[in-house]
Amino acid sequence: MAMSSVPPDVLSPEFAADPYPFYRTMLEEFPLIRQESSGGYVISRYEDVQRAFRDPVFTTDNYEWQLEPVHGRTILQMSGREHAVHRALVAPAFRGNELQEKFLPVIERNSRELIERFAGRGTVDLVAEFSTRFPINVIADMLGLDKADHDRFHRWYTSIIAVFGNLAGDPEVAADGERTRRELGEYLIPIIQERRANPGEDLLSTLCAAEIDGTRMTDDDIRAFCSLLLAAGGETTDRAVSGLFRNLLAHPDQLAAVRRDRTLIPKAFAETLRYTPPVHMVIRQVAEDVTLSGGTVPAGGTVVCAVGAANRDPRRFSRPEVFDVFRDDLAASTAFSAAADHLAFALGRHFCVGALLAKTEVEVATNQLLDAMDDIAFRDGAAPPEQGVFTRGLVTLPLEFRPAAVGSSSAAAAPAVSG
């Protein structure tokens, strides 16, 4: 490898176009980069990013300025007992019997309804017509909201995601994010108050009724959590579904293997989270001086954890730049828990509370899409490029396929949701 004397600029147009060659340079030569433009520090090696997610000296105080203007104060900003209690209040709805019995039918129905719109046509933009709609529709239905409001929720989702990608500081994008926060609050607060008085079986009612040691979520706590769920839950599944299909289509032998054996879907999803994660960079703030590979970050410093680079660190993964569903250094059995090998869901106390929801959504969607579409190919002959820096993924995925024959479903050969 040719050595570089200049560290990459993660905010440059060249980096945004294709960060992966720059990740290689960072991992080998510049494991700690001070960004002159922002005054922050970028870390890229697996052991450093892993530590940043687990060591309490790396705080989430940065979310006060990064996320609070859009969501309000959320569980991500909390620490200590406050964080533990609020996580305990929301977590049960996203795992175990609550997820399997109450929300799995919601997920299956929403996936099926979207697929039915294009299944007989032979062409689809999988992003525009499925992946960007699917998780938002699921979240709205889980919350027990009016199905007629799906388009409104999708607009709010798009607005929030645009704010997080607004690296140029476009004031119109920022203003739209603030407007979304206000509109979402005006929409949700009256519904939350109504569910407190007349609870049902939906997620909003569950959040309203949840209580730990005498602590319950306020109306604004629930509103902020719903806003966070809309953004984080929507984007992860949106980009994971499209990314998974892009990666499998680029590796036809692995696509064929997954089509034959649906129990490989969790492995394909885990490898997609490693190879092309939806979130490439996560910010932390250090409470004291911290020594990492390449130098020291002073107390109060902002640290950008380059997840996209760490997931391709050759110190941790063999052949890291190869997409391989069958790799033996990435365990699917732990890939959706705080013991995951990849770093796409973070680790430690702030491990993604919705990881099992995302897993369930991706497994259901992949099974149903494979059942509906045979001979899938890129419509334009090649995979479209990813876009984004802090979050990254496909904004379009035009496909052509042969509509599957009625009754040819193979979903029954394997359960829609494993683990």
Image (spheres, rainbow, N blue to C red):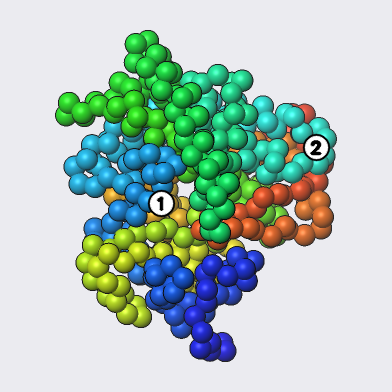
Query: Which kind of residue does numbered mark 1 sit on?
Result: Gln
Residue at 21% across / 28% down in the picture?
215
290 lies above or below 134 = below
**Where residue 184 appears, x then y in whole percent?**
48, 30
Q: Nearer the viewer, mark 1 or mark 2?
A: 1
With respect to residue 175, does 56 lie above or below? below
Circle on res. 66: 1
Residue type (three-letter) at the residue carrying disc 2: Pro
SS of the residue under disc 1: helix
Q: Which picture quadrant has residue 135?
A: top right
Horizontal side, residue 210 vs residue 256: left or right = left
Mark 1 and mark 2 in contact? Answer it, CB < 8 Å.
no
SS for callout 2: strand
Q: Nearer the viewer, residue 36 or 234?
A: 36
Q: Give 358 or 218, whichever is nearer the viewer.
A: 218
* Relative side of 107 to 289, left or right: right
Q: Which mark is residue 403?
A: 2
Residue occupying image coordinates x 72% and y 29% = 116
Q: Which residue is rendered at x = 77% and y = 53% of the image? A: 378
